Image (cartoon, grey):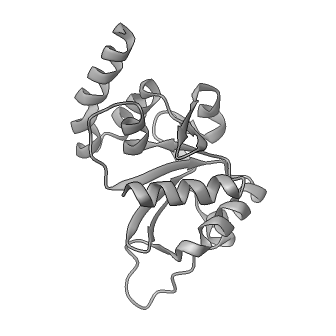
Amino acid sequence: MQNFVEKVLEALTQAGVEFIVVGGVSAVLQGVPVVTQDLDLCYRRTPENVRRLASALRSFHPKLRGLPEGVPNVVDDRTFQMRTNFTLDLEGEDLDLLAEMSGIGGYDDVAPTVFEVEVEGRRVQVLPLERLIVTKRAAGRAKDLAVLPLLEATLEATRRR
């Protein structure tokens, strides 16, 4: 998983894609002791950024997850223009692309609150724990609610330091 995350972040930063690391990977980057099975990114939904995003992901041979057999599975900039949120398979690894997040909105809504971290020599924007907690709570899924105590405990420990 770590190698996958590094490769995707490298491809996106090299292509100049505007994105924010959200979800489990953002929690891990902030010291939350969780294991995650996918990479979640919030992306800016402008035509130029969507074009860069599609181009950067092309080498990973992206496929939409969960499509029935026989349904054309094309992921390109046109695909990204047709919807907002996507669950993708990139050569056996999971990437979730979110233009909108429950309770906190989209890229432009959360961009003022993010901070940067270095991942393998690349500077990437990360959603802070406070905002991650809000979106997990608003999503209300069992897996999101289950991780809230760890997110909140890590946030509290960070604030005490």
- Left or right? Give the position of 58 relative to 156: right
Report which quarter residue 83 is drawn in.
Answer: bottom right
Q: Residue furthest top?
A: 160
Point 25% across, 29% down: residue: 150
- Left or right? Give the position of 47 relative to 77: right
Please, is residue 49 above or below residue 59 in the view?
above
Point 38% across, 88% down: residue: 69
Point 51% across, 49% down: residue: 41
In this rendered view, identify the residue nearer to me: 49 or 9: 9
Please, is residue 49 above or below residue 76 in the view?
above
Point 43% across, 39% down: residue: 26
Q: Percent x, y for residue 47?
A: 76, 58
Q: Percent x, y for residue 93?
A: 39, 66
Q: Residue furthest right?
A: 48
- Left or right? Give the position of 54 relative to 137: right
In this rendered view, identify the residue nearer to me: 20 or 101: 20
Q: Percent x, y for residue 139?
A: 37, 41
Report which quarter residue 161 is drawn in.
Answer: top left
